[in-house]
Image: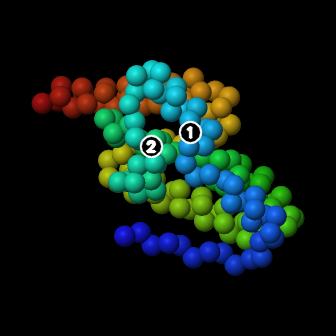
Amino acid sequence: MSVKEPRFDGEVTEKSHKNMSKIRGKDTSIEVALCKALWAKGYRYRKNYKKLPGSPDIVLTKYQIAIFCDGEFFHGKDWHILKPRLEKGKNPDYWVKKIERNIQRDKEKDNLLNYMGWTVIHFWGKDILKNTDECLRVIEETIFDQQLEENDCYEDI
């Protein structure tokens, strides 16, 4: 059973609450774009795979690859630039704590998945939308590298 994390203190305006409630956790445009590209290449996958920590957005079970499609804001892309902006904005205590915790949680789940023998790949949302082919290339190179490692193990026997 997973434990829900406590909410951060801080006032959230009605407008912010309304906007936040519209943010989806599943089947986002970035996930759909990457899934369609993987499917077109013949890769079969699981979505929002709850059997693994963090419920990765896309899982290639055959290759033990967990893929996360991360939004730039909530996962702290270019945090050294974003953090000072948030500190000057509305409700800085809430947003800085929230995003720093997201970054920390991402690292924790990556470590756990790696320990379990899974390869973890993160893509930024804009990279998926603008460079889907490049994201596919990263995934295929990861698969290729895994297959090379397997072959090297068999040669040692």
Dot 1 lies on which element? helix
Q: Quadrant of residue 95?
A: bottom right
Q: Residue at x 74, y 65 (%)?
A: 17
Q: Is residue 25 left or right of residue 45?
A: right
Q: Give percent across and percent down for residue 20.
A: 71, 60
Q: Residue 41: in sight, yes or no?
A: yes
Q: Residue at x 71, y 52 (%)?
A: 73
* Frontmost residue, 62 versus 118: 62
Question: What amino acid is labelled 2 in the image?
Answer: Lys
Residue furthest toward the top?
Answer: 41
Q: Is residue 117 left or right of residue 97?
A: left
Q: Residue at x 52, y 26 (%)?
A: 37
- For label 2, the residue is 47
Q: Is residue 47 left or right of residue 74?
A: left
Q: Give percent across and percent down for residue 122.
A: 54, 43
The C terminus: image quadrant: top left
Dot 2 lies on which element? strand
Q: Give percent across and percent down for residue 99.
A: 66, 61
Q: Is residue 120 above or below residue 62?
A: below
* Frontmost residue, 38 versus 19: 19
* Frontmost residue, 68 versus 13: 13
- For label 1, the residue is 31
Where residue 69 is drawn, which disc sits there? Answer: none
The N terminus: image quadrant: bottom left
